[in-house]
Amino acid sequence: MQAYQNNPSLNSQRASVRATDESVPQALSGYRPKFNITASGGEQSLSSTSKVVGPTILPTAPTTYFTQSGYNATYGAGATLTQTIYNGFQTANKTRQAEAQVLAARATLRVIEETVLLSAVTAYMNLLRDTAILDLQRRNVEVLQEQLRQTRDRFNVGEVTRTDVAQAESRLAAGRSQVLTAEANYKASGATYRQVIGVNPGKLTPGSPVDRFSPPNLAVAVDYASATHPSVTTAQYNVDAAQQQVKIAEGALYPTLSVQGNVQKNYMAPGSLNTL
């Protein structure tokens, strides 16, 4: 359960499945109308100056200048509604392709689940094995130490020779070496356990046999795997998605029929005009 919840490979694939799920609503959006809104605005300004010369009968009359300026603000808004009626069944095929891709992603998740859970079980059993071996080797060293003590005692009373003592010491040294090897294997198994399951190992309980979950014979196992193994179903869904892609490409050769409605409204706000 901890490996199922904490393993980063599983969490990554779950996120990938969620992202793939979104392709179905995207494909279904082809059935829905498209609505676009546009807006525009601007300002126009005008400035002009006129020169008015005095009458010819009064040459001394001053020259008059008239300046006229102003601006107009223009703005508008529009909306366009487009509904596709026929596009060579591309929308339907894209929807089927997206659904096949979702099923393939979920089957791929099952493949990773199988791999991760098998690795978790293997790491658990390896750590359980190495824990038992380490305990066994430590007990063996205790026995060899007692044998060495007894051999030395017997040597002191003359029952055995120095060779027997040396042999007992050699067996003890070999036992201690095996303890070091067992400790190294135990630590390596613990590191693998943390890597796969994501937490430090606690107190491990003995494993239970899984024979009751196994098929009764080889033929049944092969038939069951061929029909339900996620690697097989993933390949089947990928084939379906590829076939739909061919149909989508073929649909692009067909004509497209759509209905479009457009509304546009322009406004002009009068500005100020000044005469100087």
Image (cartoon, helix red, strand yellow):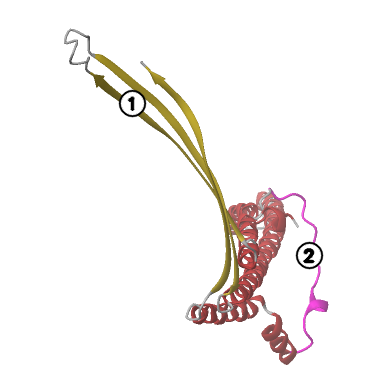
Most foreground residue, 23 or 82: 82
Asked where in the image residue 55 lies, by quadrant, the reply is top left
Q: Mark 1 belongs to which amino acid?
A: Ser
Is label 2 in contact with label 1 (beta carbons under 8 Å)?
no
Most foreground residue, 45 or 84: 45
Q: Which labelled disc corresponds to residue 207?
A: 2
Per the rendered image, the range of residues in magenta is 200-217
Inspect this view and state whether residue 206 appears: yes
Most foreground residue, 185 or 180: 185
Q: Residue 120: horizontal and vertical position, in percent? A: 68, 61
Helix, strand or loop for the magenta stretch, by majority: loop
Asked if residue 227 is positioned above or below residue 95 in the image, the reply reads: below
Residue at image point 40% right, 26% down: 70
Residue at image point 60% right, 80% down: 240
Query: Considering the numbered disc 1 on the image, is that residue within a helix, a strand or a loop?
Result: strand
**Label 2 or label 1, whichever comes before in sequence order:** 1
Q: Is residue 224 left or right of residue 81?
A: right
Query: Would you call the spot at circle 1 few (<14 residues within 10 Å), some (14-19), or many (20 or more)?
Result: few
Asked if residue 112 is positioned above or below residue 11 in the image, the reply reads: below
Query: Would you call the spot at circle 2 few (<14 residues within 10 Å), some (14-19), or many (20 or more)?
Result: few
Residue at image point 80% right, 62% down: 206
Asked where in the image residue 209 lies, by quadrant, the reply is bottom right
Q: Mark 2 belongs to which amino acid?
A: Gly
Image quarter where the N terminus lies is bottom right
In the rendered image, which residue does mark 1 sit on? 47
Residue at image point 18% right, 16% down: 56
Q: Residue 79: horizontal and vertical position, in percent? A: 57, 52
Q: Which labelled disc corresponds to residue 103?
A: none
